Image (cartoon, grey):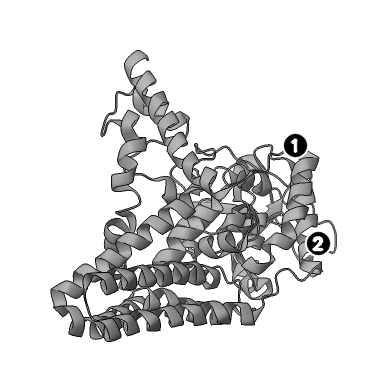
Amino acid sequence: MGKGGNQGEGATEREAPMPTFSWEEIQKHTLRTDKWLVIDRKVYNITKWSSRHPGGQRVIGHYAGEDATDAFLAFHRDLDFVRKFMKPLLIGELAPEEPSQDHGKNSQITEDFRALRKAAEDMNLFKSNHLFFLLLLAHIIVMESIAWFIIFYFGNGWIPTIITAFVLATSQAQAGWLQHDYGHLSVFKKSAWNHVVHKFIIGHLKGASANWWNHRHFQHHAKPNIFNKDPDVNMLHLLVLGESQPIEYGKKKLKYLPYNHQHEYFFLIGPPMLIPTYFQYQIITTMIRRRDWVDLAWAVSYYARFFITYVPFYGILGAVVFLNFIRFLESHWFVWVTQMNHLVMEIDHEPYRDWFSSQLVATCNVEQSFFNDWFSGHLNFQIEHHLFPTMPRHNFHKVAPLVKSLCAKHGIKYQEKPLLRAMLDIIRCLKKSGELWLDAYLHK
């Protein structure tokens, strides 16, 4: 266990020395009912706190037994406020002879990345341009208004309906990128203001749940492309990803679907169905199961607004079909943009890398242009976004040269592609994983 120091004479008037722990001891506490982690060489027992953690208990639990310093800095905007909650959780510190990094992580990369982050702070790259985000919100509201006007003026014929559906799908996609900004606390300095606007955008403009998004998305950021930790690579046996999973499935003779054809049936179960079926079902059931009545009220306000607006033109059944067609279109947009940065990268079990390296192997960029920035909500700068989740997206291009320089220094690959190639790579990687599965299934 911990090792207390020798207090010596007169120590009764001094504060008792803090217990010290080895990494070996800390890494024994990684259970759901017993979790410790390290931040700035201080050891915290987060077992009871994790269930109250605003980002969800899973995301903080993913760092049990590890150094979570860089993740802590990445996710929290108001550090002084957050540290008030940490004081009661403090149980000791790392023993002096212990390295600051666990599992042999690269301490030089970590030190250089923290210097890079400090440089970005000194350049005011975490300061947002409020007019930028106001204009994004305005152009979403304008599209919503144009959509209603098209149906009001031209009627509910096939052509006006299809045009309106594409306009609304565009507004929904853009609202998705904007709620992402507020969800990551990248707009206002005060977290509470970000939370309020986040609930409005994701709830009233999209009919989804802020808490559902937070608990799911932060896990993805904490451990991107890590099986059993990143929910975005939990494919429910519909797809096999990366190189290790297909071989594991093949050796075990697991064949839930013909995975050697997954690059073909992906077009049927991926882009068309993610938002209209899986996300929609998961969001509603999660809000009800967790009794998240605030988020549910925001979501109900979205559905009420939509049906009040379009039932007079289409009737109830027609409005339901119209809504799902819009989500069908949006789902294609969402899947291609979000997967072109991740699905094509390394996907595996926990390798225990430093923060910088773990984000670089799991993300890649798409070339910058005005269209690419708008189309992807600046997630074409996925590398910079993952390294600095609270950085306003309009500053990603400014920090990118610093990130490239650090990658070059340590021989880490910084991947950037044209938009079309990035999308085609999704199909290529699915085909490759499917072939690995088939080979293992038949011959191993």
- Depth check: 91 or 231 in front? 231
Q: Quadrant of residue 283?
A: bottom left
Residue 154 visible: yes
- Depth check: 271 or 222 in front? 271
* Quadrant occupied by the N terminus: top right
Task: Give the residue type that dot 1 points to.
Answer: Gly
- Depth check: 86 or 134 in front? 134
User: For residue 411, which numbered disc appears in the image?
Assistant: 1
Is 62 positioned to the left or the right of 144 in the image? Answer: right
Secondary structure state at the residue bearing disc 2: helix
Residue 17 visible: no
Mark 1 Cα within 10 Å, few/some/many (few <14, many 20+)? few
Which residue: 18% across, 78% down?
Answer: 314
Q: How far apart are marks 1 and 2 (CA)?
A: 21 Å
Q: Say which residue label 2 marks.
A: 119
Which residue: 61% across, 44% down?
Answer: 358
Image location (x, y in percent) of residue 259? 32, 31
Which residue: 55% across, 42% down?
Answer: 28
Image location (x, y in percent) of residue 333? 42, 58
User: For residue 153, which numbered disc appears in the image?
Assistant: none
Tell whether label 2 touches label 1 (CB within 8 Å): no
Q: In which quarter of the image is residue 99?
A: top right
Secondary structure state at the residue bearing disc 1: loop
